[in-house]
Amino acid sequence: MLFLRFLSYLPFSLLYLLSDLLYILIYYVVGYRKTVVLNNLQRSFPDESPERLKQMAKGFYRNLLDILVETVKLPDISPQELQKRLHYTNPSLLKEYINAGQTVICTGSHQCNWEWVPSAAVVIGIPVDSVYKTLTNPKMEVFMQQVRGSHGAIPTPMKQLPRQLAVRKDIPRVIALVADQVPDVPEQAHWMDFLHQDTPFYPGTERLARSRSFPVFFLELVRVKRGHYEGTFSLIAAPPFNDLPEGAILERYRDKLEEAIRNNPSDWLWSHKRWKHWREKWVKVGAKLE
């Protein structure tokens, strides 16, 4: 991890040079998950030409490697520079609730540089508990906790969220969830059509909102230029949720996410195996468990 800490002290100009070199290696030589990426793109954009899909894939790899070096750099970025590099267009939308003593949920995705999101919110006065999946590598988990805790954000492993909710129940804040991950227990997932494919979503986001009466927001990130992003919040649903049918909050999240991906397809994380499960298998498994 010392090498990664060394990288964090390098200027962005050298880090982006490193990213360009890694792009050549990863895309043209190693071919890291290239089949997964192209299959995901082809199934999500069935009407696009092979050449256009290839352009999307190349753009994705450039985005991915920029995220890698930018994330390593996060602990060394000053609050002032971070504000310039990730600009929130309407933070007052969240601050209004927080100043009134209300905790809110903010649902994001693996779009642009999601790792900068919590810290960039904290430096403008928005407290954030950033919920994430624990990494399997213990040393990398420790390193990423340090990175994600930069500037005062509170990194919260998903399994520790219930405890954090109890311990910090009197602290109004944002609970940030990257809600486009693959559910660990597909038989309990909420299934929806997403990018032309039957897709499982974590039901926990909606359950948490309903059980705690938390308003739910969506954050869309847009790349303005290299190393600079713009984030815009939009309200998905606010309590009381009595008139909303079950699954409506997740469906609204799905709609927002799909629109964001269609607007900027290369900025989403196409290398993860988002569609490795299928409904027929897990519906049968779920029925056996009941």
Image (tube, helix red, strand yellow):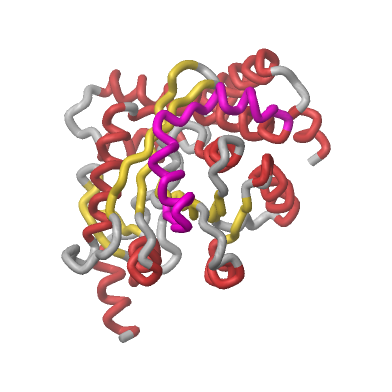
Q: Hey, which residue is sitting farthest front in the picture?
A: 100
Quadrant of the image occupied by residue 41: top left
For the residue pair 269 and 209, the one nearer the viewer reads as 209
* Residue 70 x, y percent position in the rendering: 62, 29
* Residue 196 x, y percent position in the rendering: 20, 44
Q: Hey, which residue is sitting farthest right in the picture?
A: 2
For the residue pair 77 and 290, the one nearer the viewer reads as 77
* Residue 52 x, y percent position in the rendering: 29, 20
Quadrant of the image occupied by residue 222: top left
Q: Residue at x 20, y 34 (%)?
A: 46
| Residue 208, above or below 290 | above
- Residue 152 placement, left or right of 127: right
Which image quarter is the C terminus in? bottom left
Q: Residue at x 36, y 24 (%)?
A: 56
- Magenta stretch in the rendered image: 76-105
- Residue 58 placement, left or right of 14: left
- Residue 26 placement, left or right of 103: right
Q: Residue at x 44, y 26 (%)?
A: 230
For the residue pair 156 and 210, the one nearer the viewer reads as 210
Q: Residue at x 51, y 33 (%)?
A: 113
- Residue 175 placement, left or right of 74: left
* Residue 75 x, y percent position in the rendering: 71, 35
Residue 186 in view (yes/no): no
Residue 6 in view (yes/no): yes
